[in-house]
Amino acid sequence: MKNRFVLILDFGGQYNQVIARRVRELGVYCEVYPYGRALEVINEKKPAGIIFTGGPNSVYDEGAPRVDAGVFDANIPILGICYGAQVMAHMLGGKVEASDVREYGKTETEFDSKSPLFLDLPSRSSTWMSHTDRIVDVPSGFRITASSPGAPVAAMEDRKKRFFAVQFHPEVSHTICGQQIIKNFLVGACKCRCDWNMESYMDRAIGEIKSRVGDGKVLLALSGGVDSSVLAALLSRSIGKQLTAVFVDHGFMRKNEGDEIESAFSEWDMNFIRVDAGKRFLSKISKITDPEQKRKAIGEEFIRVFEQEAKKIGKVDFLAQGTIYPDIIESGLGDAATIKSHHNVGGLPDCVDFKEIIEPLRMLFKDEVRKLGRSLGLADVLVNRQPFPGPGLAIRIVGEVTREKLDILKDADYIFREEINRAGLGGEIGQYFAVLTSIRSVGVMGDFRTYDYTIALRAVTTSDFMTADFAKIPYPLLERVSSRIVGEVEHVNRVVYDITTKPPATIEWE
Ligand code: XMP
């Protein structure tokens, strides 16, 4: 383990998580820490290598982030990226200068292929640049190993000390050879073994859960989302019947989904409790039209229902939370434990009697959580689920939610998803669903005038759900979906396709 851990020091760059994911994809375990904790983590974890991320500052800004100088004396290979490269140059005696022009986007870059960092690379290739400042003099002991039109020092190295720095972003896919560069650093400079994988992670996690929980009791609120489902499977595998999973079915799941979740867990060794609370939730939000109030009311009700169930179970030793790594990184790495409340609102169930919280997924990214789910043998319907908002279909019905509207939306959404999957597009479209707009309009069916609802179809392609493009679904497919929905779902006489990107729209309508 000692030989395999890589420390990523976060200087505030927007790609810090991407760097961590790239390193892990290469089979090397890494963790992200704020730059200020460098020495503490080095002493405790003895990393095989350190990566400085980019960041928004200029090294000459007042209070600009600097790393403790001791980091450079620790005899550990370092790779500085963008701002991280400039920090390295500046702190070791080189010169960084503000430039008039920002170098931004894909940039042709020349590499010195004698550098261990650029081993097996062509001498010229495209990199992703995003900087205004640039290194103009390298520190003593360094030499220049790459250049681009806007960055005379696009890379530099002190091979003896195993310090490397690149002005461009190797972690971004537009840097054609980026993954090879990161691999060269990990394998060539840090001597990492690239053998970290989900099976070994799973075995270790199960061992750790067993020893932490002992013969204690664990309680988990199961929403049916990917994180809580994988967590339930992992806990079941580790401690079996000592786990009680409470699945609060709020009635806003997609068609058949509540039953699918229950049956997916029927074979697993745990106490599984399903609470059918659909009526209760519906009456709680029956008069609410404001999206935020709706979300809040559902989140709070979820906690209340969960509390009531928990009280029946009595005292437990642990409450399990499905916190994942992005939550931890975004909170500045959990100096205080981050607690993710269900649906991101509503707070922790304070009436539940537990001693400690366990968060066994806290070091995993979302795609790694899915991989773990597969390694555990969790059903595909759960592992491959699309993201689904905690408040469910209630926020895909614009305005007031009624039983009738819920039934209409469930059927329309089912048809849309079925057709997308039949066309084999489920993999390439990130998220696709139907929305009940609550607009009614005039139509004609047979010889009759209708005055019925409009369904909006939403399908987006996205890599991170922060930005999204609408999916360019073939017209014949849209036509089929539309005619099936108006033909098969009563009280719908119009179907529209949402062609807005995010931003300015969001993916969900509420
Ligand atoms: P928006 O609508 O903000 O959604 O563009 C971005 C992504 O987040 C999902 N989403 C949620 N996920 N709880 C969740 O776990 C929520 O309350 C929630 N609201 C939106 C949404 O489906 C999309 O994937």
Image (tube, helix red, strand yellow):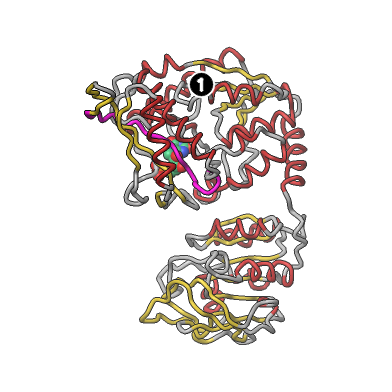
Q: Is residue 122 magenta?
A: no
Quarter that holds the C terminus: top left
Q: Quadrant of ligand 1?
A: top left
Count of labels shown?
1
Q: Quadrant of residue 316?
A: top right
Q: Is residue 441 magenta?
A: yes
CB at disc 1 and ligand 1 closer than 8 Å: no
**Residue ranking furthest to the top:** 312
Residue 436 in the image: above or below residue 100: above
| Image coords of residue 175 (percent x, y) | 55, 70
| Image coords of residue 456 (percent x, y) | 34, 36
Q: Quadrant of residue 319?
A: top right
From the viewer's side, name the closer residue of 52 and 469: 469
Mark 1 — residue?
A: 249
Which type of secondary structure does the marked residue at label 1 adopt? strand
Q: Dot 1: within a 10 Å radius of its alpha carbon, few (fewer than 14), some, or many (20 or more) residues?
A: many
Q: What's the amino acid at mark 1?
A: Asp
From the viewer's side, name the closer residue of 342 and 379: 379
| Image coords of residue 475 (percent x, y) | 40, 46
From the viewer's side, name the closer residue of 380 and 105: 380
One can see residue 74 in this view: no
Residue 403 in the image: above or below residue 382: above
Name the side, left or right, on which 256 lies relative to 286: right
Residues in magenta, as a range:
426-442
Name the side, left or right, on which 113 lies relative to 175: right
**Residue ranking furthest to the front:** 447
Main secondary structure found in the magenta portion: strand
Residue 70 in the image: above or below residue 479: below
Name the side, left or right, on which 16 lies relative to 27: left
| Image coords of residue 26 (percent x, y) | 69, 59
